[in-house]
Amino acid sequence: MPKILSKEKLSENISKIVVEAPHVAKATKPGQFIVVVPTENAERIPLTIADFDKKQGTITIIFQIVGATTRILNSLKEGDNIAHILGPLGVPSHMEKFGTVVVIGGGVGIAEIYPVVKSLKETGNEVITIIGARCKELLIYESELRTQSAELKTTTDDGSSGRKGFVSDELKDIINSGKKIDRVIVVGPVPMMRVCCDVTKPLAIKTMVSLNTLMLDATGMCGICRVTVGGETKFACVEGPEFDGHQVDFGELASRLSAYKNKEKEADNHVCRLLKNG
């Protein structure tokens, strides 16, 4: 069983754990994710792999404590075992020498862009990174991203660190400066990704977004993760998580993500019978 080697509290509701999972680490590429079942009776949750070390056989997971299952995961300590990890899953981020790439992370998405930024730099790109959060305390991975970026720009809603405003404001400034941008990659809350795509679409700047959809089996069989991209139904778990942001139906995505919010509030005392009886 995968063992938690270290655990760190990054902010009030964001935790980082390093897990011994050599088979997953060996096969992982930037942009991929895993499905985690923290304990035998817990639900399945998809989490992006924030970092991986093939030699050490470890993966790093950074997650926000927002529901019943993430609270269970956060209750585990160093030395504890995670019941099940499935992965790596999803299509890796496409890497080539694009030129100048702006990579944007918001909230927990800041950690999720780290392996992508590293790989883009290794491929010979000039990487400008923009990260944003509600306040200074939620700006994570700042030093790590700074070492991998030609420039790092930070924003906070309340102005407690960096620019007071949003990541899209910094994106607009870079574009308005006249600098040629060859690609934009955005990872974070759906409204943030949508706004960034609205900025780049009129200029036809290729913009990729990573969709954190609802998932269950993560094999493309159940269809829960479906999204509409370019007028066609796609399954994020096997055809994503990255898609052309200019083609994503963000309205439908936001509606589907909010469908089970009330059920999540009832989930604290839920026991997954499939796992319990299986």
Image: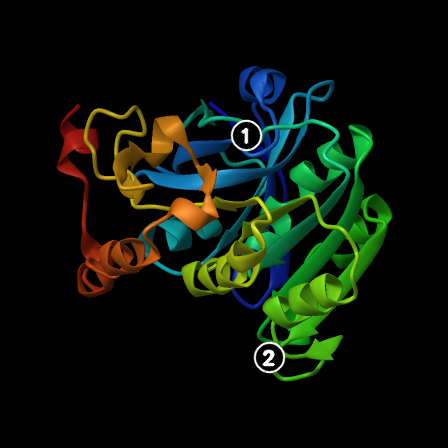
Residue 98 located left or right of residue 205? right
Q: Nearer the viewer, residue 78 or 168?
A: 168
Residue beneath label 1, please? 3
* Amino acid type at image mark 2: Asp
The image's colouring method is rainbow
Dots 1 and 2: beta carbons under 8 Å?
Answer: no
For the residue pair 213 and 100, the one nearer the viewer reads as: 100
Residue 146 left/right relative to 237? right
Based on the displayed image, in which of its 4 quarters is residue 191 positioned?
A: bottom left
Indicate the position of residue 97 as horizontal and vertical percent values. Answer: 75, 30
Name the spot of residue 74 as percent of width and height, x first.
47, 51
Asked which secondary structure carries label 1, the reply is strand
Tell me the quarter of the picture where residue 229 sits. Answer: top left
The crowd level at tag 2 (other Cα within 10 Å; few <14, some 14-19, many 20+) is: some
Question: Where 203 sits versus 222, above or below?
Answer: below
Q: Which mark is residue 157?
A: 2
Q: Residues within 10 Å of mark 1 (few under 14, many from 20)?
A: some
- In the image, residue 155 sits, relative to residue 142, either above or below, namely below
Residue at 69%, 43% (x, y): give it. Answer: 182
Dot 1 amino acid type: Lys
Separation of residues labelled 1 and 2 (CA atoms): 37 Å
